[in-house]
């Protein structure tokens, strides 16, 4: 059933104090590859079993406000035949949709990409809204290299993200725009800062052009970090300081919240960085999480596609959600991590 909330109310609920988003929108095929890579067997129901494990983890709603799903997951039923989307709504979490259908290479570029899935999107969004989906998420993947991201790739991606955001709001769905600056590479943190600033400015130019209401929009951002192959890795306080500074320059205060992707950071760093920002800075927006890997990496290792491991995997998911929920209000500490590990 359609939500009666405005996009502004949805956006604010998603970043309610001490809560963040679980990104569960890995499509079936990449999920199956990932599961196989853990050495586990993969069968027809594995994707359903994993989605059910995530969406029904006990008390997850204490720290998770919304769940990003694939189209397949929005239509999925549990092993017992119940709609998983309705379970999520009944538990007070907001279902979200990743309506994108894959990355395609930009014609004329040197391998840069743009998301596809705009065809029929107006109609699909109307259908999702009728099912009770409250928000959408659309990702741009921008790779730092000697000559990338190009102005061409930034323009193409921000334009498409803004189109999706405008279409989402038209359907009563709150958009999350995700201009990800990827951490893969040997670049310095200063170069990441410079690229992130440029990308954020272009993102808001495009949102303005498309008449997107910022109060009903969230940004899913990457942190300003050293490239993962850079010999000098910036410390937690530097990442927090430079990330906050780039947002102050590039993200209007009208945006209710910024939720981070984890992007390949370790579970520890994803939490420590978020906590350092919230503990040390006065900010005009809420800063929270929208993690996939930094919430689900450990649970998947525990699960290994064995039903008897599901409760332990769910407990591990709850623990990571709790650590990040505390980081969203600057109240996480390393002691909390080790206390929980000791129990
Ligand atoms: P990661 O946290 O694994 O980077 O994923 C975020 C995301 O956007 C998936 O929807």
Image (cartoon, grey):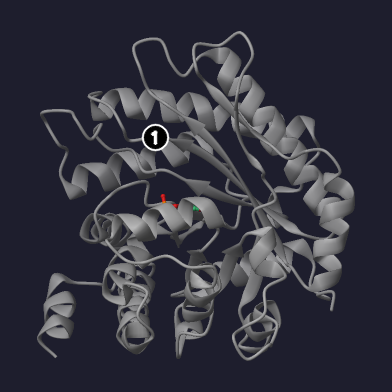
Q: Quickly name the residue at label 1.
A: 182
Q: In this view, does 226 lie above or below 92?
A: above
Tell which of 217 and 173 is nearer to you.
Answer: 173
Q: Check mark 1 vs ligand 1: CB closer than 8 Å? yes or no.
A: no
Residue found at x 63% / y 91%: 80
The secondary structure type at the circle numbered 1 is: loop
* Residue 253: percent from left, percent from top: 58, 48
The answer to whether residue 72 is visible is yes
Tell me where residue 238 sits by quadrant.
top left
* Residue 215: percent from left, percent from top: 70, 54
* Residue 167: percent from left, percent from top: 82, 46
Tell which of 54 and 94 is nearer to you.
Answer: 54
* Residue 313: percent from left, percent from top: 33, 80
Q: In which quarter of the image is the N terminus?
A: bottom right
Name the side, left or right, on which 326 lies relative to 93: left
Residue found at x 69% / y 59%: 71
């Amino acid at each position: 059933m359609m939500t009666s909330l405005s996009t502004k109310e949805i956006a604010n609920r998603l970043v309610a104090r001490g809560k963040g988003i679980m990104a569960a929108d890995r499509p079936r095929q990449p999920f199956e590859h990932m599961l196989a890579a853990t050495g586990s067997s993969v069968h027809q129901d594995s994707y359903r079993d994993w989605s059910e494990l995530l969406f029904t983890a006990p008390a997850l709603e204490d720290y998770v406000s919304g769940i990003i799903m694939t189209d397949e997951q929005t239509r999925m039923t549990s092993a017992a035949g119940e709609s998983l989307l309705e379970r999520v709504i009944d538990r007070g979490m907001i279902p979200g949709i990743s309506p994108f259908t894959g990355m395609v290479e930009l014609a004329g570029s040197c391998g840069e990409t743009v998301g596809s899935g705009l065809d029929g999107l107006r109609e699909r969004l109307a259908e999702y809204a009728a099912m009770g989906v409250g928000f959408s998420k659309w990702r741009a993947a921008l790779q730092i290299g000697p000559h990338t991201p190009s102005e061409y790739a930034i323009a193409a991606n921000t334009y498409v993200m803004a189109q999706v955001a405008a279409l989402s709001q038209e359907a009563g769905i709150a958009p999350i725009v995700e201009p990800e600056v990827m951490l893969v590479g040997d670049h310095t943190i200063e170069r990441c800062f410079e690229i992130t600033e440029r990308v954020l400015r272009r993102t808001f130019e495009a949102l303005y052009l498309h008449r997107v209401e910022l109060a009903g929009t969230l940004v899913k951002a990457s942190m300003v970090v050293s490239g993962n192959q850079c010999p000098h890795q910036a410390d937690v306080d530097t990442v927090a300081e430079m990330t906050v500074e780039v947002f102050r320059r590039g993200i209007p205060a009208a945006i209710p919240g910024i939720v981070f992707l984890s992007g390949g950071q370790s579970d520890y760093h994803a939490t420590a960085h978020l906590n350092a920002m919230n503990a040390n800075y006065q900010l005009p927006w809420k800063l929270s999480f929208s993690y996939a890997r930094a919430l689900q990496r450990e649970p998947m290792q525990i699960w290994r596609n064995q039903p008897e491991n599901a409760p332990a995997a769910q407990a591990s998911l709850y623990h990571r959600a709790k650590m990040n929920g505390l980081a969203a209000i600057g109240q996480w500490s390393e002691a909390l991590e080790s206390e929980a590990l000791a129990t």
